[in-house]
Amino acid sequence: MADERTRYFRRLGRLRRSARRWSVLAGGLGGAAAVLTPYAGLGLPDAAWAGAAGSAVALAAWRWIDVRALAAQPAPPALDPAEAAARSRARLVAAVERLPVGPGVLAEVRRVRSRIALRGTSAGEQWARLDRAALTLAGMAPRLTGLAEPAVQEAAAADGSLRDLASRVASVERALRLAPADARAPLAEAHAVLTAQLEGGVAAYERLVVAAAGYLAEDARPETAHPAADRLTEATDLLHGVAGALAELRAVGTPLRAPTR
């Protein structure tokens, strides 16, 4: 989608081209009417020529009036390059999201970009652990319903909070590398506290994922054998019985032969 300035000049160009076309058409029809009317005398066809010429002249005049009115308006200011790039990126993201696999692709791209941004910091390892745990929980989330649903919502909120904390840890660590010697002690202390919070939060998130897996395992484990296994056992016994019966019938139907010397 073009910006306001581009749309303004496009509309002005369309109006000018339309005004020129109607001007040429009005001139042609007017000239034809001026030549043909005296040539054949006044009649019904002459009224048609004159009416068409008059209509073309009126439309051409209106188009030129529209052109002058639009040209009198100030053109919108040029769009900032950063804003134009942001709009283009937003349009591209919206187009990709409309594809069947678009949301998954965008999520993976964002995850990889965030991981690359934390590369070389102590938060990178915690981010990778959080990613693995989040992907595992996302695979189980559709089956975590009922009593487990509040835990899934809490995990989603904790995921965003921990990722924000990881970004803060990385920012403080980068600032610590550039800080002068007299300012490193407070930053180092803050970095240690934030890192401890991040490690504890990621560990708690992993324990939540393990608990969710245990919930699924217990919820899906029946007290007796699985019905499918029972049906397979019955079918196996039936086939064994049929095979034994066929073997007995074949033995009865085959005549005994006298031994020969």
Image (cartoon, helix red, strand yellow):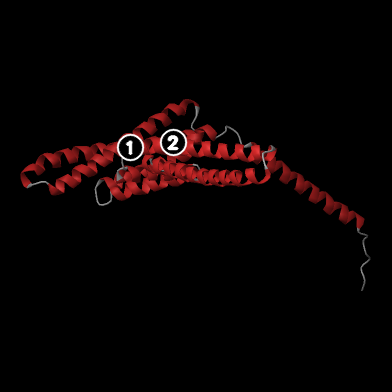
Q: Please name which of the two marks, 1 or 2, marks the residue nearer to the observer.
A: 2
Q: What kind of residue is marked 1?
A: Pro
> Which residue is pictured at 90% across the width and 54% down the height?
252
Q: Using the rendered view, name the quadrant where residue 187 is placed.
A: top left
Find residue 212 and report its image quarter: top left
Q: Residue at x 92, y 61 (%)?
A: 256
Residue closest to the far bottom: 261
Task: Identify which amino acid the numbered label 2 is placed on.
Answer: Ile
Q: Is residue 160 above or below residue 20?
A: above
| Left or right, residue 242 beside residue 117 | right
How many numbered circles does the render carry?
2
Q: Nearer the viewer, residue 155 or 104?
A: 104
Q: Nearer the viewer, residue 123 or 22?
A: 22
Residue pointed to by mark 2:
65
For the point 44% across and 36% down, which residue is it?
65
Viewer-proximal residue among 95 and 146: 95
Residue 102 shows in this picture = no
Across and down, in percent, residue 243 comes to 79, 51
- In the figure, is residue 127 to the left or right of 230? left
Placement of the C terminus among the 4 image quadrants: bottom right
Compute the Cα span from label 1 to label 2: 16 Å
Q: Position of residue 146 (x, y in %)?
A: 50, 26
Residue indicated by mark 1: 74
Residue 72 at x, y percent in the picture: 35, 36
Instruction: Count neighbours of disc 2 (C-alpha within 10 A) and say few if under 14, some if 14 to 19, many if 20 or more.
Output: some
Q: Which SS class for mark 1?
A: loop
Tag 2 secondary structure: helix
Q: Residue furthest left?
A: 182
Residue 241 visible, this angle: yes
> In this view of the protein, which residue sits in the foreground, 68 or 142?
68
Q: Residues within 10 Å of mark 1 (few under 14, many from 20)?
A: few
